[in-house]
Image: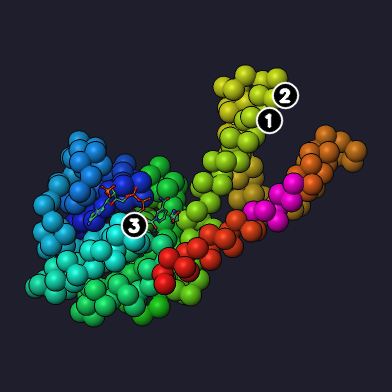
Amino acid sequence: MNTTIFFAGTGNMGGAILRGLLNAGTDAKNIFFFDPSDKAAEAVSALGCVRVKSFAEGIEKANVTFLCVKPQIFKLVAAEWKAAASALKSEKTFISIMAGVARKSLIEVLGEKNQVLRVMPNLPLTVGKGSVGLATDGVSEETLKLAEEIFGNIGVTCRVAESLIDAVTGLSGSAPAYVFEFIEGLTRGGVKAGLTRDVALKLALGTIEGSVELVKQSGKSPSDLCAMVCSPAGTTIAGIDALEEGAFRSTLIKAVVAGTNRSKELGK
Ligand SMILES: NC(=O)C1=CN([C@@H]2O[C@H](COP(=O)(O)OP(=O)(O)OC[C@H]3O[C@@H](n4cnc5c(N)ncnc54)[C@H](OP(=O)(O)O)[C@@H]3O)[C@@H](O)[C@H]2O)C=CC1
Ligand SMILES: O=C(O)[C@@H]1CCC=N1
């Protein structure tokens, strides 16, 4: 990919996208970044990416800018970013990953003359296995295709209406954390049942990877596959009973809705 990219913010998520792109073959010399955190910046400089001195310098140098600061920081830097964007001599593309920040608020800062796209990525992009929702309202087909080209190298993409991007945030944006908790819980269960932690983690990871692949390849629903594991009066239905007692599925539904609602709040 020949596009030059600027990252405003290279923390957990900006850094994950940047590393994913490097792993997928993007030339580090085509990636510029600005981050006031010396710790984050030194790690990214070590990868060969080019540190710039300001947001203004970064957006001028690159064709595509990723906005990867916290939503709370966006409010603090809005005036500086507005001045920098209005000084641009040519049209640029901005892709915001910030939870909750509406495209309308982004355009107020970045200006109508630029292409502005709101997306919701997730952390596994760093290993080329991420999920990204793209908010389509008001965005040109060319910009959507450009974003799909960038993210398509490191994950799956879904186009959604902007009204649903908070739901994407509650699901794929946030759920890697729930999956990590799930892995930890299974591992501890194995340890409680007598396995060493190493063996328990290896088995938990293998089981999750295999189950994901089976859902993808079999064409069966997760519920149908669950029934195939549950022998009558067997071990699995005993475990499912314990999960039901802990309201497992209902808790997951509540977690996704809680994340969705929090994303909406962040935009206010
Ligand atoms: N973490 C995740 O899994 C996901 C996060 N997001 C979104 O990504 C965004 C970033 O989150 P996350 O990466 O977790 O946060 P981090 O705090 O890890 O990263 C943000 C980085 O931006 C830096 N920063 C602060 N001010 C500026 C500035 N003016 N210009 C450039 N960089 C600046 C911070 O430095 P310092 O620490 O010194 O303040 C920090 O290194 C958020 O808006 C979040 O909603 C979206 C999907 C998933
Ligand atoms: O927790 C957060 O607010 C961010 C957005 C999605 C994942 N992490």
Tell me the crowding category of disc 1: few under 14, some 14 to 19, or many 20 or more residues within 10 angstroms, Cα based: some
* Mark 2 residue element: loop
Residue type, numbered disc 1? Gly
Tell me the crowding category of disc 2: few under 14, some 14 to 19, or many 20 or more residues within 10 angstroms, Cα based: few
Locate the N terminus by quadrant.
bottom left
> What secondary structure do most residues of the magenta stretch adopt?
helix
According to the picture, the residue beneath numbered tag 2 turns out to be: 193
Residue 242 as seen in the image, left or right of residue 248: right
The residue at the point 62 percent across, 26 percent down is 200
251 falls in the magenta region: yes
- The x and y percentages for residue 163 are 48, 75
214 falls in the magenta region: no
Residue type, numbered disc 3? Lys
In the rendered image, the vertical position of residue 248 relative to residue 198, given as above or below: below
Q: Closer to the observer: label 3 or label 2?
A: 3
The residue at the point 65 percent across, 34 percent down is 186
- The x and y percentages for residue 180 are 54, 41
Q: Is mark 3 within 8 Å of ligand 1?
A: yes
The numbered disc on residue 189 is 1
* Mark 3 residue element: loop
Q: Quadrant of residue 221?
A: bottom right
Which span is picked out in magenta? 246-252
* Mark 1 touches mark 2? (CB < 8 Å): yes
